[in-house]
Amino acid sequence: MVVVGAGLGGLLVASEVARRGGRPLVLEAGPVPGGVAATVRDEDYLLEPAAGSFLLPHAHLTPILESVGASVVPAEAVAQRRFVYDRGELFELAGPAALATRLVSRRGKLHLLREPWVGSPATITDESLRSFLQRRLGPEAGRMGATLMAHGVFAGDPDQLSARAAFPAIVALEDAAGSLVRGALARRRARSKDVPRARAHTALNGMDGLAAELAASLGDGFRPDWPVDSVQRDGNEWIVSGRGEERTPAVIVALAPTEAARIMPGPFSPLLNEAHAAPVAVVGLGGPEADMPVPSGFGALTGPDAGLRILGLLFESSYAPRRAPVGHRLLKGIYGGDADPAVLALTDDDLVALAIEEAGRILGVPFQPSWTRVIRHAPGIPQYHVGHSAWLDRLDQVAAEFPGLHLAGWGYRGMGVTSLAQHAAALAERVLAAP
């Protein structure tokens, strides 16, 4: 099989196929693997401009990483501490104890307690994330939860994101048990006691280092500087054309949808060009510990009444100390997306100034970073809007006419490294089972 694109989505598919005994060939247009996982290294700071952690153990990601001998380490235990900034106050979310905070009013907490008895609609529709959570949790807690989830995963708008497409595991709780609480309890009872609880891990050599390890494990099956111009059917084979020509019974195009539209057969292009992504900016702030009082924890998300433009502030050097020089600290702020596209009109200098001011407001102390960096992502983070599942169904209908041709990557069926690994396992099984 041939994989077009050596982002993490394509590399995980190829690595899983290789782990199961297949022979993948990955073709990458650029000189190095990784895609958006382009770790910034400067003055001993290590800034991850995209995903910087993942949960392990995981049924699909763990076997892939173990098979290639990937260098991953557990995040510091403080990664379990998560915060929310709203209404001028920083709240710590610590499991059930979070119900004791003033993040949600007493009335809002009463709505939460009634969740197991909230009925499900007779016909399940493709609800927005805000609609779904407000229906289940009440207006106040639902609004808060939808904002935090949209900001934290998609830099998105909770009124536009599809609950079912963007957060399928949560909607599945209602599908299975008629309630998020009852569904979560049933899932907990079904969990094997022999499997440790998943916790945050990081790539020891950076996310681009992880990509390099996955690519290296493929040996000659990874070819950089090999841009693909087209993927076309020829009898029972596929011809992948670019710097040369490769013939194969199966092709997995692991590119962003609009990039995939450029090389896929004609019927795919109109659908793929319907995909929506939202540009984001990542702002890194680093400096000596005395000037950067970063707290212990993973980070803070901003709530609907935060009055700030920052969507999330990650305490990078707190849960991953190797990301800053000894005696220094590193913060990472996220801006833009569908949540606030207008903020990206600011210059880099203005974004840095805004991040310094807003980080100080969130943590209640002034910041004086000596190291800053702005990374802009375009087209940015895929947005699974209401209608995304129907769009995938239409893509599947077209794909049925082109056996052996598949799509992969975070533009389709899940964000995050673990979701990419789950889809990689499903694709590997389909490709290797094909006659």
Image (cartoon, rainbow, N blue to C red):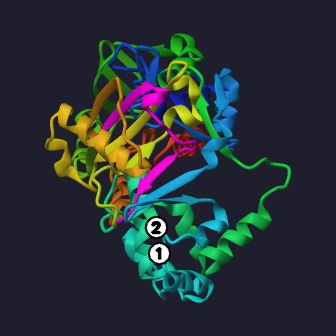
Verify CB contact (< 8 Å) between mark 1 and mark 2.
yes
The three-letter code of the residue at mark 2 reads Gly
Q: Residue 215 bears which disc, if any? A: none
Is residue 83 in view? yes
Residue indicated by mark 2: 145
Q: Secondary structure at mark 2?
A: helix
Camera-side residue: 142 or 258? Answer: 142
Q: Residue at x 70, y 28 (%)?
A: 66
**Relative to 22, does residue 169 appear above or below in the rendering?**
below
How far across and down, in percent of the image, does residue 412 sit?
A: 40, 49
Q: Residue at x 38, y 55 (%)?
A: 151
Residue positioned 48% across, 37% down in the render: 293
Query: Which SS class for mark 1?
Result: helix
- Left or right: residue 409 compared with residue 375: right
| Residue at screen point 49% across, 44% down | 416
Residue 131 is left or right of residue 16, and the answer is left
The one of 234 and 172 positioned closer to us in this rendering:
172
Q: Residues within 10 Å of mark 1 (few under 14, many from 20)?
A: many
Disc 2 crowd, CA 10 A, few/some/many (<14, 14-19, 20+): some
Outermost right residue: 194
Q: Please name the residue that numbered disc 1 is placed on.
A: 141
197 vs 159: above or below: above
- Identified by mark 1, the residue type is Ala
Question: In front here: 191 or 347?
Answer: 347
Q: Is residue 127 visible?
A: no
Q: Which residues are magenta?
A: 280-304
Residue 99, relative to residue 200: is it above or below?
Answer: below
Vertical order, 391 against 73 (above or below): below
- Residue 158 percent coordinates (x, y): 35, 65
The percent coordinates of residue 319 (x first, y second) are: 58, 36
Label 1, label 2: how many angstroms apart (C-alpha)? 6 Å
